[in-house]
């Protein structure tokens, strides 16, 4: 925080983006200071646009994964190593980024409030509301991750930054609500540019801020306010929502726009190729976990350890449709569930199967067989658990470019926040069931099957249903980590190790039969893919692979650990060296 304050004292707001009055543009062709800048309405718009930078909207995702839905081979983030300290780079960098964003928006807000000649009264109200909404979101992120933090509502001097102490997160939360209330009152229901914050976004962000702090009454009221606007609806097709081409949808409440033209895109190998299967030129190193695959319920609405429909030899069969829209499905040699058992599954033009006996796969673009680099019997660094992400990965990624918009808040989240808040308040009525079932039913659109609707009004049963619904709906969207944190499940979910396949010999010769524990224990006895049904904890919904481990059907690739102290991140050591008034979170 102080490092940035030093810089801002020298040049104030360093960089604002040149844009038109109505279009959000992420380019930055020039530099302007706040001292001589705000002379036109367009310049106020440019100042506000600084708050939309992706660097200030930080997802709880990383190269190696924060949660139990994501793995990257045997590599671990400190979050899952249990090794977070006050010198944890990610905590330091995000602390600095968020205070940079906060300070910039406070400068903008002050200039808006002081203006007497440039902005119309309506412009002034709208711009003030927009800046307030951004500040509410920034401060919410800070207390969610750090707890009590230094709080200020005017730009600090260097001297003040040396002595400021931490404010309780409960006090900051009320300030956050005030920011969002200003935004709700002043923002329009619709903006000329869909990428700008709106009244619905302010309601939704307030609901998220509240439920992350277990303030269920406020969360329910704010979520209902967003729902009652009547301007949002679920996208008809779950899988299509995350495609690059889906730039706008009635489900998207707020997103950060990205494109190659805007200079906002992922083109690095580790951000694109790590998600692409090896047969498409990628590495398939970042994978959904076995725990995530086990979490999707069956089409009868039951968990896999209770449903007679579940087949551990074909784990994609008879599952909630979001399972095959999230994780690349594969046809087993025994039963392809509508897929050709001899050809597996066509994913972006190439058959996908990790089966060790399938050393060749079909290239649908040519009709010819090719070497299967997505099985470890051919390529030792193929997916360590046989799984790959399908959600959001589309044809555009084949050029090693990923520039889909970053969806920060969508209507499905609002519906489930509302349902969760009402469940925790034990105010269970038909609106709660309707909210959950609306999300669940959308997953079945176009499948020819009816969704298994939730009918129970038992609080404990609904709580479990709601939590698993969130897991199925929001996998790899950066929400699972904070769900585990606020539900106090991180210690259990993130301390079980990363589960993967047993070892198998590697040989590219299609005529050489692989050997090893995977063949001896799983494939040859006819137990591939899982062999046994993983148990689902009926208290918290977390899958348990102990039975498979005990039967030598899989292995722990790397141990994980999440100590209790990590429910909050540490205050960076560098900040405490400069300011002796900053206390530390417990355990660091």
Image (cartoon, rainbow, N blue to C red):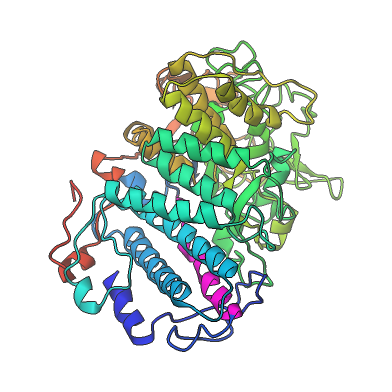
* Residue 535 in picture, x, y percent from top left: 46, 18
Tell me, yes or no, whether the highlighted magenta stretch contains residue 47: yes
Front residue of 346/245: it is: 245
Tell me, yes or no, whether the highlighted magenta stretch contains residue 42: yes
Can residue 194 be seen from the camera position used here? yes
Which region shows up in magenta? Answer: 41-64
Q: How many marks?
A: 0
Lateral position of residue 50 relative to residue 239, left or right: left
Can residue 68 be seen from the camera position used here? no
Outermost residue to the left: 580
Relative to 427, residue 232 above or below: below
- Which secondary structure class fits the magenta region best? helix
Lateral position of residue 236 relative to residue 323, left or right: right
Q: Quadrant of the N terminus?
A: bottom left
* Residue 323 in picture, x, y percent from top left: 63, 32
Front residue of 331/543: it is: 543
Residue at x 59%, y 48% (from the top left corner)? 200
* Residue 194 in picture, x, y percent from top left: 67, 59
Residue at x 22%, y 72% (from the top left corner)? 161
Residue at x 59%, y 78% (from the top left corner)? 41
Relative to 78, residue 195 above or below: below
Residue at x 63%, y 69% (from the top left corner)? 24
């Amino acid at each position: 925080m102080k490092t940035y304050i030093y810089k801002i004292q020298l040049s104030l707001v360093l960089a604002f983006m040149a844009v038109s009055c109505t279009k959000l543009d992420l380019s930055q062709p020039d530099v302007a200071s706040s001292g001589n800048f705000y002379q036109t309405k367009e310049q106020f718009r440019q100042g506000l646009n600084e708050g939309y930078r992706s660097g200030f909207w930080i997802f709880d995702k990383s190269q190696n994964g924060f949660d139990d839905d994501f793995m990257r081979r045997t590599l671990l983030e400190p979050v899952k190593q249990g090794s977070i300290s006050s010198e944890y780079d990610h905590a330091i960098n995000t602390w600095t980024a968020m205070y940079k964003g906060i300070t910039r928006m406070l400068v903008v807000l002050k200039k808006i409030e002081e203006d007497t000649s440039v902005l119309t009264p309506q412009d002034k109200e709208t711009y003030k509301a927009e800046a307030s909404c951004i500040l509410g979101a920034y401060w919410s992120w800070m207390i969610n991750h750090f707890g009590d933090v230094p709080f200020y509502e005017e730009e600090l001097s260097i001297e003040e930054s040396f002595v400021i102490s931490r404010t309780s997160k409960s006090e900051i939360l009320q300030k956050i609500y005030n920011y969002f209330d200003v935004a709700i009152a002043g923002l329009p229901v619709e903006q000329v540019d869909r990428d700008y914050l709106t009244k619905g976004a302010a309601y939704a962000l307030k609901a998220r801020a509240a439920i992350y702090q277990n303030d269920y009454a406020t969360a329910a009221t704010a979520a209902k306010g967003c729902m009652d606007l009547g301007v949002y609806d679920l996208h008809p097709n779950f899988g299509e929502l995350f495609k690059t081409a889906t730039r706008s949808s009635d489900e998207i409440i707020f997103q950060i726009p990205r494109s190659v033209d805007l200079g906002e895109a992922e083109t690095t190998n580790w951000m694109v190729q790590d998600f692409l299967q090896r047969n498409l030129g990628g590495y398939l190193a970042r994978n959904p976990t076995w725990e995530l695959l086990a979490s999707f319920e069956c089409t009868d609405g039951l968990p896999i350890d209770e449903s007679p429909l579940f087949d551990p030899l074909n784990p994609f069969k008879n599952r909630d449709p979001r399972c095959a829209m999230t994780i690349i499905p594969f046809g087993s040699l025994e039963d392809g569930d509508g897929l050709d058992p001899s050809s597996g599954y066509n994913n972006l033009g190439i058959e996908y199967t990790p089966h060790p006996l399938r050393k060749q796969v079909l290239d649908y673009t040519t009709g010819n067989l090719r070497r299967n680099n997505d099985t470890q019997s051919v390529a030792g660094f193929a997916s360590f658990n046989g799984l790959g992400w399908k959600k959001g990965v589309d044809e555009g990624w084949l050029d090693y470019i990923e520039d889909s918009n970053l969806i920060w808040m969508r209507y499905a989240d609002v519906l489930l926040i509302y349902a969760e808040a009402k469940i925790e308040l034990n105010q269970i009525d038909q609106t709660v069931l309707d909210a959950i079932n609306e999300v669940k039913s959308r997953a079945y659109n176009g499948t020819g099957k009816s969704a298994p609707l939730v009918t129970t009004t038992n609080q404990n049963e609904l709580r479990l249903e709601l939590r698993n619904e969130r897991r199925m709906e929001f996998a790899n969207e950066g929400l699972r980590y904070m769900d585990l944190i606020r539900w106090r499940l991180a210690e259990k979910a993130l301390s079980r190790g990363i589960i993967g396949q047993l070892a198998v010999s590697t040989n590219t010769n299609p005529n050489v039969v692989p050997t090893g524990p995977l063949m001896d224990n799983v494939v040859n006895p006819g137990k591939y893919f899982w062999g046994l049904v993983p148990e689902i904890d009926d208290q918290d919904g977390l899958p348990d692979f102990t039975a498979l481990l005990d039967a030598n059907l899989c292995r722990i690739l790397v141990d994980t650990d999440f100590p209790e102290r990590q429910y909050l991140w540490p205050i960076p050591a560098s900040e405490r060296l400069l300011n002796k008034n900053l206390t530390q979170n417990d355990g660091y």
